[in-house]
Image (cartoon, rainbow, N blue to C red):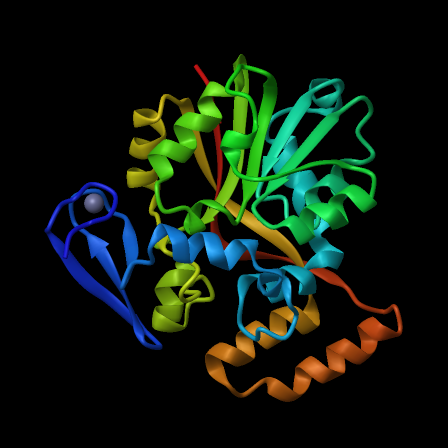
């Protein structure tokens, strides 16, 4: 077996998760799932309407829906990293892997922002368009390869991408000279990954195929043409019921509380709390 990113054979077993094994490459730092899926398997996952079904149990997507109430605040913090309201006014933004457009919803208050979302999932794009946003069904190559965008953003996407260098270079080609990248991806070096072991919420099999740590990710971005890479700890604003469910999954003793918090939220008395989600928040410049 060799590393799908750098082809090194210097790899070691990291964690066993269900019937899969996460391996870590000593050369480039990436962790990858074994067995590694084929391109046609991956294509089938994301074009299927089932990927967005709510009954899938422990998929990243179910979690995404549960987080919806806190998403606006989460995205506002992320956006602020690139600039203030004046910076955002009039920008042209491309979101890759936009799903149902939660980020687009959060961007709505920004004046003159031109949003385009792309996704491999046709059903998600239909929903996005019904909400009045510009959407394209396809991958990054469905967008003309010319420097057209001020901002490229993608959240919870890179860990699903089998050929990240190709993906990042394609985005690089579509950014203007002063264009910027904004994204999140889980960090295997995060505190949460450390304390959670094989139960880490980002070990989502079989969909999370490549997981990064800051040093290797910085190297990958620079090799793909990007500069001025900054990696920060991401925070998400989540409801107490959501947070408690996560804690209960780890330690088991708190299960009853989730229902209590849920009842409060149903009465409109919920509160949002910022939690570290074990993700890196990354910004980088085209040049
Ligand atoms: Zn490697």
Residue 39: x percent and y percent?
37, 50
Residue 262: x percent and y percent?
76, 77
Q: How many labels does the image show?
A: 0
Residue nearer the viewer, 145 or 85: 145
Looking at the image, which residue sits at the far left? 10
Residue 29: x percent and y percent?
24, 47
Q: In this orientation, does residue 258 appear?
A: yes
Q: Is residue 266 above or below residue 276?
A: below
Q: In this orientation, does residue 189 appear?
A: no
Give ligand 1's quarter of the image. Answer: top left
Quadrant of the image containing the C terminus? top left
Looking at the image, which residue sits at the far right? 267
Q: Residue at x 57, y 50 (%)?
A: 235
Q: Which residue is drawn at 60% across and 19% down?
A: 150
Q: In this view, does 222 lie above or below 136?
A: above
Quadrant of the image containing the N terminus? bottom left
Q: Residue at x 62, y 69 (%)?
A: 243
């Amino acid at each position: 077996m060799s590393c799908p990113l750098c082809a090194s054979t210097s790899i070691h077993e990291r964690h066993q998760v269900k019937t899969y094994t996460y391996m870590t490459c000593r050369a480039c730092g990436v962790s990858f799932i074994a067995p590694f899926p084929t391109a046609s398997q991956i294509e089938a996952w994301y074009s299927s309407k089932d990927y967005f079904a709510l009954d899938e149990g422990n998929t990243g997507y179910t979690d995404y829906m549960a987080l919806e109430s806190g998403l606006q605040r989460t995205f506002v913090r992320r956006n602020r990293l690139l600039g203030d309201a004046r910076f955002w006014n009039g920008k042209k933004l491309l979101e890759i892997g936009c799903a149902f457009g939660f980020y687009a919803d959060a961007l709505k208050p920004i004046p003159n922002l031109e949003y385009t979302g792309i996704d491999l999932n046709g059903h998600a794009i239909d929903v996005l368009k019904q909400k009045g946003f510009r959407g394209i069904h396809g991958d990054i190559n469905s967008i003309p390869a010319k420097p057209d965008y001020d901002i490229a953003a993608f959240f919870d996407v890179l860990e699903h991408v089998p050929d990240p260098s190709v993906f990042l270079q394609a985005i690089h080609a579509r950014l203007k000279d002063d264009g910027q990248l904004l994204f999140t991806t889980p960090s295997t070096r995060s505190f949460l990954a450390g304390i959670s072991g094989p139960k880490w919420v980002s070990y989502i099999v079989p969909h999370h195929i490549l997981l990064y740590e800051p040093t290797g990710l910085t190297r990958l971005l620079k090799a793909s043409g990007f500069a001025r890479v900054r990696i920060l700890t991401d925070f998400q604003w989540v409801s107490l019921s959501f947070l408690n469910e996560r804690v209960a999954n780890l330690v088991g003793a708190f299960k009853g509380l989730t229902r209590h918090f849920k009842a409060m939220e149903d009465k409109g008395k919920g509160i949002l709390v910022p939690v570290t989600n074990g993700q890196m928040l990354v910004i980088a410049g085209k040049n």
